[in-house]
Amino acid sequence: MKVKVTSKKGLKTSLSVLVDKKIIQNKLDEKLEELKDKVHLKGFRPGKVPPQVIKNQFGKAIYGEVIDKILKETSTKAIEENKLKVAGQPKIDLKTFGEGKNLDYTIEVETLPEVKLKSLDSIKFVDYEISVDQSTIDKRIDEISKSQQNFSDKSKSEVAKNGDMVIFDYNAKINGKSFEGGDGKNLQIVLGRDLFIKGFDNQLIGVKINESKVVKVKLPPNYPKKELANQNAEFNCKINNLKKPIETKIDDDFAKKIGAKDLKDLKDLVKKQITGEYKRSLDSLTKKNLLDQIEKLHTLDLPPNLVNQETKILTQNLKKEDIEKNKEKNEKIAKSRIKIGIILNEIAEKNNLKVNDEEIKNEIQKQIRSMPGQEKMIMDYYKKNSNAAASLKGALYEEKIIDLLRKKSKSTKKTVSLSEAEEIIKKNANSNQVETKTVKNPKNKKKK
């Protein structure tokens, strides 16, 4: 195989490749020999079909398959030998081919730009710590206790109050006619939560056991039967039972019931949960800030085909008029994603960052531990979806790069209260989150 660089302009490189006809003939002979034991033709015993007969019968198809394989192998080798970092799919143009002839073709590729990494000394970020006061922890535990609410029966002489549980049968009608889904037995609702139909709860306040009550409401816009949405309905309710809430005592026994060792352990777990919620949001802002600074530090020429591909991904679910209206904005976001992705990959390569199989397995195990009883479902998901495993690997790879950036940049520790954290998050809520794109050499595919 002979390879020659015929032109190099900016990010575009053209290669000329010549494969000797002897190599092609050898590959054809090998293929015919391989097929001899597989082809079944009338008049010949299995494995005894002469290569020439196979060639006469399937010649064009065999030649096409062999050429495809040679193109893939030689184009990949040509790109690797010239150390080209390809952006997108190479374009292959066949010049001369055919049985008994040399294979002569050209490869045109767009390459990734050369990245001259700048020092990270000038990059600064705030490393936030969250301060959670005891009253916030107590409030969250109180909310948990209410969600674990127990009830006891009320007497027949008592009436339903806000916070009570009402258990009832119902038959609903619209314009005097019953409708599908309009009957129910022993439905339980807690008055004041308004979880059944808006405005339903208030009309049951004051009812007694064994009493009948007509409740008039408008069915919600998202009612399963679309033709009944927003219709006025009358629910004839028969009250079967009333229950009043039992005050939950927040102590060690309560903590144990919901999986903690004791009340102190529960408070620690709740504090960790609250801290984690805000820390994740603030870390996301820190990450965006780091990426913005990295992007501003570097100037790159970007491969147009990658920008076009990314823009198409960004706009794939938009209407044509919306695509045109936001064309500049979407292209800007696409360029930013591609640029940051190229820079991050260069940083990773320079620092030899990689994600191995063991790290992927550990991350999957972490997911399994966070979802008890779902082990088979999670394992099947990753086994059956190669894209899911690749996406997980990409996320771990990016996480390693961001961790490296944080270590090499100058950080300032800052402890903030929850209200301060909320203000910071709110202030940055409308800023565009830039999603990075891992840009690597794709597998080469030909375009004739």
Image (spheres, helix red, strand yellow):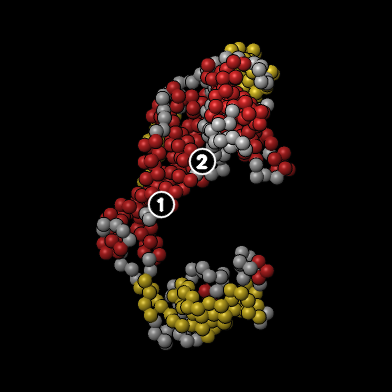
Image disc number at residue 387: 2
* 374 sits left or right of 305 in the view: left
Q: Hey, what amino acid is under mark 1?
A: Lys
At x 65%, y 13%, the residue is 7
- Near-viewer residue (270 or 136): 270
Q: Position of residue 293 (x, y in %)?
A: 51, 29
Q: Quadrant of residue 68?
A: top right
Decide: is 127 above or below 423: above
Asked whether residue 84 is in view, the answer is no
Query: Is 100 located above or below residue 442 in the figure?
Result: above
The foreground one among 255 and 180 is 180
Residue 267: name its quadrant.
bottom left
Considering only vertical position in the picture, is 55 above or below 207?
A: above
Q: Is residue 78 above or below residue 291?
A: above
Q: Which mark is residue 376?
A: 1
| Front-lying residue, 99 or 154 | 99
Q: Secondary structure at mark 1?
A: helix
Please name the residue shown 44% across and 81% down the image.
Answer: 241
Location of the N terminus by quadrant is: top right
